[in-house]
């Protein structure tokens, strides 16, 4: 198999470093350059790879694909530029901050014959994969309801709390992972949302919590607790749990539960050592393999849009104080 020449545009998102490391370890990928208008984000890596101050110069090279891990507000213009340059795109979540932007991204990639993949790493968790297999086989009967959480600590980079750059706070940042998993497993779409959001845990100018109630077209109802509520002393800064309630049983999924508890005199508190699969390596390998062999990517731009529109509807519901229907 040949190597895929890739570029990294934007390292503002903290996941960008993990994707870059996954590309480094992938024998079928070659990192041809990195770019970020904020040089500070690129400085840890600019001695290892060619640095392009202007991302458009990187797009003019012979790379075949780009990884976009910029601030959320820049996903759309960067993807549109990459599509015009006929580069395949792997884009960090959320795919965009408006439905119009995301539709434009999807259409531009289709029109230019390139693939667009959304970075939903949690689809690669064995806990999630096996739950889907059980549900697909009818192991818990017909799914009636779901209860979910996706909580984390306050992001360490300031742009997450600047609406001009992020497009939204915790409710956007954390809900999209869960909604994508549910869309994938339930094979349906959300048709109604009722949500409450607020700022309860931190002195920041954006939401740090949200409770989202939703209904799917197939009748499944659900609730999602999404927040930046984890304190600094907590052993792991993230969680993602799902409970599927069916007519013949239930399945409880805890994506972050593959851990060892570590107690050491050198640390101020207990720590968790994660021994699960490296999800970044799995999703990067899938993207690289798909582009090299011409297979369709498994998590499309449409998938990214179908999860993000639920978060956007949740903000509208919270603002209006009533349920919002999705077309």
Image (tube, rainbow, N blue to C red):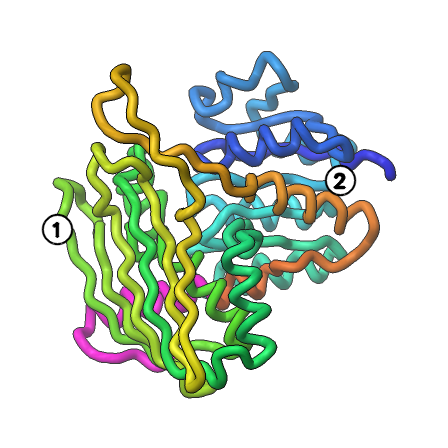
Q: Secondary structure at mark 2?
A: loop
Determine crowd level at label 1: few under 14, some 14-19, many 20+ residues with C-alpha closer than 10 A. some
Q: Quadrant for the N terminus, please.
A: top right
Report the magenta stretch's main SS: helix
Q: Nearer the viewer, residue 225 or 75?
A: 225
Q: Which of the labelled discs sits on residue 45, or is there none? A: none
Name the residue: 41% across, 47% down: 256
Which of the two discs, 2 and 1, labels the residue nearer the N terminus? 2
- Check residue 322 for magenta coloring: yes
Q: Quadrant for the C terminus, please.
A: bottom left
Q: Which of the labelled discs sits on residue 200, or is there none? A: 1
Residue found at the very far right of the displayed protein: 1
**Would residue 269 be found to the left or right of residue 258 on screen?**
left
Name the residue: 30% across, 71% down: 223
Question: What range is drawn magenta here?
Answer: 307-327
- Check residue 23 for magenta coloring: no
Where 229 sits versus 106, above or below?
above
Residue under label 2: 64
**Would residue 36 be found to the left or right of residue 111 on screen?**
left
- What percent of the width, then of the height, locates residue 232? 22, 33
Where 98 sits versus 217, above or below?
above
- What percent of the width, then of the height, locates residue 279? 55, 44
């Amino acid at each position: 198999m040949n190597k895929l020449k890739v570029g990294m545009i934007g390292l503002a998102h903290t996941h960008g470093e993990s994707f870059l490391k996954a590309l480094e370890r992938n024998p079928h990928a070659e990192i041809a350059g990195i770019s970020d208008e904020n040089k500070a984000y690129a400085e840890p890596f600019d001695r290892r790879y060619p640095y392009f101050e202007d991302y458009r110069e990187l797009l003019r090279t012979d790379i075949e694909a780009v990884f976009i891990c910029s601030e959320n507000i820049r996903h759309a213009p960067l993807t549109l530029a990459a599509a015009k340059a006929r580069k395949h795109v792997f884009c960090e979540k959320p795919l965009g901050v408006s439905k119009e932007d995301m539709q434009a991204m999807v259409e531009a990639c289709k029109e230019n014959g390139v693939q667009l993949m959304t970075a939903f790493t949690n689809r690669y968790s064995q806990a999630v994969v096996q739950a889907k297999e059980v549900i697909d086989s009818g192991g818990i009967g017909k799914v009636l309801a779901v209860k979910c959480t996706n909580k984390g600590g306050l992001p360490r980079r300031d742009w997450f709390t600047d609406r001009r750059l992020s497009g939204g706070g915790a409710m956007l940042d954390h809900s999209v992972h869960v909604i994508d998993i549910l869309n994938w497993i339930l094979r349906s779409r959300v048709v109604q949302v009722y949500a409450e959001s607020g700022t309860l845990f931190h002195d920041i100018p954006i939401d740090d919590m949200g409770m989202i109630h939703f209904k799917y077209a197939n009748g499944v109802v659900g609730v999602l607790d999404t927040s930046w509520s984890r304190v600094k002393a907590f052993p792991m800064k993230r969680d993602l749990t799902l409970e599927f309630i069916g007519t013949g049983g239930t399945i409880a999924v805890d994506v972050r539960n593959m851990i060892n508890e570590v107690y050491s005199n050198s640390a101020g508190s207990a720590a968790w050592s994660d021994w699960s699969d490296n999800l970044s390596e799995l999703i990067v390998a899938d993207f690289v393999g798909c582009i090299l062999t011409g297979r369709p990517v498994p998590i499309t731009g449409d998938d990214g849009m179908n999860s993000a529109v639920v978060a956007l509807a949740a903000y509208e519901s919270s603002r209006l104080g009533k349920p919002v229907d999705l077309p």
